[in-house]
Every structure is written in C-alpha cells, then in structure tokens.
Image (spheres, rainbow, N blue to C red):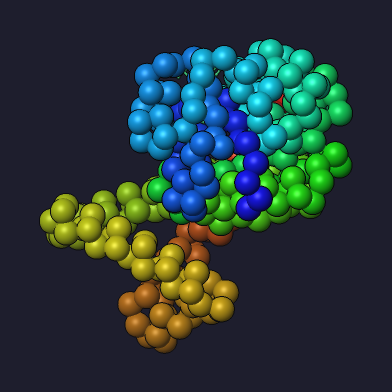
Amino acid sequence: MKQQTLGFIGAGNMASSLIGGLISDSYPPQDIWVSDVDEMKLKDLAYRFGVHTSTDNRAIAARAQVLVLAVKPQVMQSVAVELANPIQEHSPVLISIAAGITEAALDHWVGGGAAIVRCMPNTPALVKTGATALHANEKATPEQRNQAEAIMRSVGLTVWVSSEPLLDTVTALSGSGPAYFFMLMEAMEEAAVELGLEREAARLLTQQTALGAGRIAIESEEPPAVLRCRVTSPGGTTEQAVAAFERGGFRDLVRQAMGAAARRAGELSEQLGG
Ligand SMILES: NC(=O)c1ccc[n+]([C@@H]2O[C@H](COP(=O)([O-])OP(=O)(O)OC[C@H]3O[C@@H](n4cnc5c(N)ncnc54)[C@H](OP(=O)(O)O)[C@@H]3O)[C@@H](O)[C@H]2O)c1
C-alpha cells in the first residue's frame, strides 16, 4: 500500500485492531494519526504502536490523506459535521466502517463532493480473521479504493460489492454471521451434554470442530454441499443427523433469519439518516 498519512477518528475496538493490523503489515506508525474523546485510549494506542494521537478530530482530518471514520453510527453525524471544513479544504478519502451510515448521508454531512469508501467489517476483525465488504462512491479513485482495501485487508479478507444496498445483505451474512455460528455451537454443546458428555469436553470438541470445518471449507476448492456429502456416508450417523435437520426446515429457517436481519439493517440505515 502506498504510504500516506492515515487518520483515524475514534480509537475504539475496531480502530485499534486496524492500526495493529497495519503496523504488523509494516505500515510506519509515524504516518498514523488517531483522535478520540477518551485520552486513556489514545495513550494506550501511542504506547502499544507508537502512533501520533490527539483529542482534536479536526486537526487529524486536516492532516490525513486517508481518513478512517471509526466512531459509533449514533455519533457519526455530529462527527462528520464537525469535520466538514477540514474535509472540504484537504479532500481526504473517507473510509467509513460505521454500520448503516449511507454514502449519501455521510457526503451530505461533510458538505458534498467527498470520495467515500463504505466498509462493513465484522467482529472477527478483532482477531485478524475479519470479513469485510466494501463499496465506493463515484468520487473515489482506483487508488483510493486500493488504499481502503489494503487497510481492511490488514485484519482479514475483503470483497467488493457492486451496489451499496447489498451491504444490508452483507450485514445479514458476515456482519451478524458470527452469532449464527455461536448459536449452532451453543446448541451442539448443549445436545452433547444431554447425551452424557462432560461440559468441558463438549465445549472443546465443538470449538475445534467449528475451526476444522471452517478451515476445510476455506482450503478446499469445493462448495460446502460437496464437502458435506463427502463426510456423509450412506447409512451412517451423519446422514441421520442431516436428515433430521432437513425435516426440521433448517434451510428455510436460515433464509428467514437472514431476511429478517437484512430488513432490520435497512430500517436502521433509514433511522440513521440514510
Ligand atoms: N466492533 C465490531 O466488530 C464492528 C463490526 C462492524 C462495524 N463496526 C463499526 O465500527 C465502528 C466502531 O466500532 P467499535 O466497536 O470500534 O466502537 P468503539 O469501541 O465504541 O469505538 C468508538 C470510539 O469512538 C469514540 N468517540 C465517541 N465520540 C467521539 C467523537 N465525537 N470524536 C472522536 N471519538 C469519539 C468512543 O469513545 P467513548 O467510548 O468514550 O464514547 C470510542 O473510543 C462503529 O461505527 C461500528 O458500527 C464495528
């Protein structure tokens, strides 16, 4: 990634993960500037990574060529309005990771004409296995798109989507997705305990099975349906379990759950100014 001055507004969980990812990708800490209302968080980041910090959002926005907006969606409007002047003056590319804030709303709040890349990361980014979808507005240049992608790739995988509303689908898939896997893990652990296994053993075996299945799915060229068939011998145990899932309407339940999540993402986006 071409080295430019990176600014982060908000020094919370996501910003500190991204900064950690960039530093471990050899991005020079002296080119990273971070602001937050919380001085303790800034001190911690300066100590851990050697980045520059300030409690003055406007000073960071005036310095950055790439500005990552990493505050909660609820405060994004006031932060964006506060930054409108330095953004209009210096024209950094804005990288927003705030769930539900549309490119149009953000552009309006900062006074119009901004290059914006909107990203939808997920919680595993905090442990460098994130999945982030990105969409850029028409003002963002290919180089600015690459910069946004490189920042998000420092904490995991990135995928571009062809239209902004698809980020609601992404929210229902990878955004909320970790909870679906946790729920399946919860249910598997509980069922194993009911079948007589000790809790500790049930938890460990569930966790490692989730990790192993995920790793096989990522490393294989085959789609999950083929992988499932491969571990389902005719007349065997897995076949009985899969048949029970099918009888219980598992696929339809997943479809309903994700539809509900995507609809809610759209509603929240409208409430937040979309
Ligand atoms: N965490 C995730 O897994 C995840 C996943 C997808 C998307 N996101 C998005 O990422 C963004 C950041 O999430 P997060 O989990 O990192 O949140 P977070 O830990 O709460 O970080 C946000 C930081 O911004 C600070 N802040 C609040 N008002 C500010 C202001 N006016 N100026 C400067 N800083 C201000 C907060 O300080 P206080 O705590 O003192 O208010 C906090 O330190 C959110 O928009 C969220 O939608 C996060």
Q: Residue at x 40, y 85 (%)?
A: 233
Residue 266 in sight: no
Residue 60: where, in percent of width, then height? 61, 23
Picture quadrant where residue 80 is located: top right
Instruction: Name the residue rendered at 32%, 49% in the picture.
Output: 186
**Residue placed at 26% from the left, 51% from the top?**
190
Instruction: Give the left or right position of residue 32, taking residue 200 as reference.
Output: right
Residue 120 or residue 156, whichever sits in front: 156
- Quadrant in the picture for the C terminus: top right
Residue 92 falls left or right of residue 259? right
Task: Please state the horizontal and vertical placement of residue 192, each as a whole percent of the image.
Answer: 23, 59
Q: Nearer the viewer, residue 56 or 153?
A: 56
| Among the 4 quarters of the image, the one containing residue 117 | top right
Q: Is residue 6 visible?
A: yes
**Above or below, 185 relative to 138:** below
Residue 157 x, y percent position in the rendering: 56, 56
Relative to residue 162, is residue 222 drawn left or right? Answer: left
Give the x, y percent position of residue 87: 75, 23
The relative height of residue 79 versus residue 90 in the rendered view (above or below) is: above
| Residue in the image at 74% along x and 45% along y | 144
